[in-house]
Image: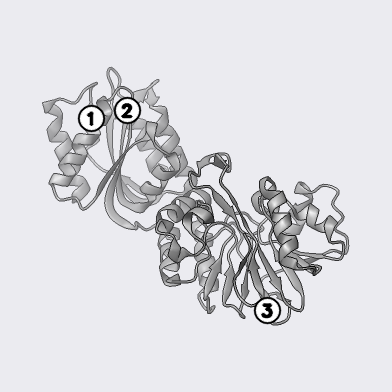
């Protein structure tokens, strides 16, 4: 897709509707967009390439958008292969072009393009450096570990445009979710799932980036995935501040359940019923065995409290719950209160493992009582469920 963004700037990104798993782990039912931009000024700059899966389409669009001009620069904001796969081709096709990137990216580049001829063809940028294109100029902002160490953002004062790399991205092809954020009713949901699973571990680094960008007069955010954002930018910035601060976004309780034969699930459903009857503003229950783990991670971070309900398994905890808690550990789950409901037919162990994993996370406290059921929930278990519900709502 070629789209005119301003007098001298074109969007030349491509949609991928056939990808089964983004980064070989995240389902993308609405596809993914690989965003790329072109600035046609006194100097011409390509801003990032795309995934090799869409090489033919992108090359064709680039040629059409250039309208016979020879590009002067290829700006690399992020070296991950879904944005950099065609760097080698660009260097070979346009022998007078200069590759512009941060020093860390230039150091890493041979790992991806062994043998590429770079001598005399690179320009290393650091924090505050400016690439002058004419009317437009790109001022570079270092964003290490958002979410790779070499990431740079750039700001163009002429358009008030922040080229944000993977920050402010989301899952979904633009042909499905809309080109601009205002066209995308689902931005927050998929933006949140994207953030916590792709960037979420690096909240401190995102906070540092937000402080750097706060003084800028940002009129549009142009990420490497997802819609171009132009309206209600304060809303997106506020969400990123909340998410990267590890603060709850929604007052509510997320019940994550891993049940083998249905007994644990029945108890979790009963707990949900009790919580709602007691006035809980929102209670979301997910069967971990039959749902998207990335969405479950998103819900854990979104809500103010959580309950983990799991069967015991091999003297430990049922594997979908172990996988879920491990994912939370990796992504930096923090600052939450969590209740535990375990099930064990002869030697309950799920609660012990869940507690060990949760207490290893930053500022995560486990509520009492830990509820234990044996195989199937019985009337005698109801007082313990009532007590846990009361503790969650206290």
Residue 136, disc: 3
Nearest to N terminus: mark 2 or mark 1: 2
Q: Residues within 10 Å of mark 1 (few under 14, many from 20)?
A: some
User: Percent position (x, y) of residue 142?
Assistant: 63, 66
Quadrant of residue 235 within the rendered picture: bottom left
Tell which of 78 and 352 is nearer to you: 78
Q: Which residue is mark 1?
A: 266
Q: Which residue is mark 2?
A: 259
Name the one closer to the observer, 393 or 225.
Answer: 225
As helix, strand or loop, the secondary structure at mark 2 comes to: loop
Q: Are marks 3 and 1 in contact (CB under 8 Å)?
A: no
Q: Quadrant of the N terminus?
A: bottom right
Foreground label between 3 and 2: 3
- Give the mark nearer the N terminus: 3 vs 1: 3
Q: Is residue 164 visible?
A: yes
Image side of residue 292 versus residue 117, left or right: left
Q: For the point 50% across and 51% down, which residue is it?
A: 172
- Secondary structure type for disc 1: helix
**Residue occupying image coordinates x 22% and y 47%:** 392
Q: Residue at x 28, y 22 (%)?
A: 344
Other residues around mark 3 within 10 Å, as few (<14) / some (14–19) / many (≥20): many
Q: Position of residue 301 (x, y in %)?
A: 38, 50
Residue appearing at x 76%, y 58% in the figure:
106
Discs 3/1, front: 3
Instruction: Classify 10 Å Cα crowding around label 2: few (below 14), some (14-19), many (20 and above).
Output: many
Can residue 102 be seen from the camera position used here?
A: no
Check contact, mark 2 vs mark 1: CB within 8 A.
Answer: yes
Q: CA distance from mark 3 to mark 1?
A: 61 Å
């Amino acid at each position: 897709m070629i789209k005119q963004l301003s007098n001298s700037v074109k969007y030349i990104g491509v949609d991928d509707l056939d990808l089964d798993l983004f980064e070989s782990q995240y389902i993308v039912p609405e596809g993914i967009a690989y965003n790329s931009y072109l600035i046609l000024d006194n100097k011409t700059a390509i801003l990032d390439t795309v995934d090799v899966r869409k090489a033919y389409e992108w090359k064709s669009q680039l040629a059409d958008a250039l309208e016979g001009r020879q590009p002067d620069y290829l700006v690399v904001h992020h070296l991950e292969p879904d944005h950099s796969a065609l760097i080698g081709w660009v260097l070979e096709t346009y022998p007078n072009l200069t590759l512009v990137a941060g020093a860390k990216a230039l150091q890493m580049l041979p790992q991806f393009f062994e043998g590429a001829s770079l001598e005399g063809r690179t320009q290393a940028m650091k924090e505050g450096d400016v690439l002058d294109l004419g009317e437009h100029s790109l001022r570079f902002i270092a964003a290490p570990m958002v979410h790779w160490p070499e990431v740079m953002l750039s700001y163009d004062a002429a358009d008030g445009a922040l080229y944000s790399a993977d920050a402010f991205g989301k899952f979904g092809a633009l042909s499905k979710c809309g080109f601009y954020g205002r066209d995308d009713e689902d931005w927050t949901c998929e933006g949140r799932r994207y953030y916590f699973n792709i960037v979420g571990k690096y909240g401190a680094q995102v906070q540092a980036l937000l402080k750097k960008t706060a003084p800028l007069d940002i009129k549009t955010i142009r990420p490497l995935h997802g819609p171009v954002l132009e309206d209600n930018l304060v809303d997106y910035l506020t969400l990123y501040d909340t998410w990267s601060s590890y603060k709850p976004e929604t007052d509510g309780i997320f019940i994550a359940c891993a049940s083998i034969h249905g007994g644990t699930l029945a108890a979790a459903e009963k707990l949900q019923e009790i919580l709602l009857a007691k006035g809980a503003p929102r209670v979301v229950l997910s069967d971990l065995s039959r749902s998207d783990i990335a969405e479950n991670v998103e819900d854990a971070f979104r809500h103010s409290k959580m309950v983990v309900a799991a069967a015991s398994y091999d003297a430990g905890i049922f594997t979908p719950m172990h996988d879920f808690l491990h994912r939370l550990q990796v992504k930096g789950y923090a600052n939450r209160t969590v209740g535990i409901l375990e099930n064990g037919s002869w030697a309950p162990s799920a609660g012990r493992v869940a507690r060990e994993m949760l207490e290893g996370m930053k500022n995560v406290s486990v509520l009492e009582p830990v509820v234990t059921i044996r195989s199937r929930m019985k009337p005698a278990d109801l007082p313990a469920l009532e007590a846990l519900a009361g503790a969650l709502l206290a």
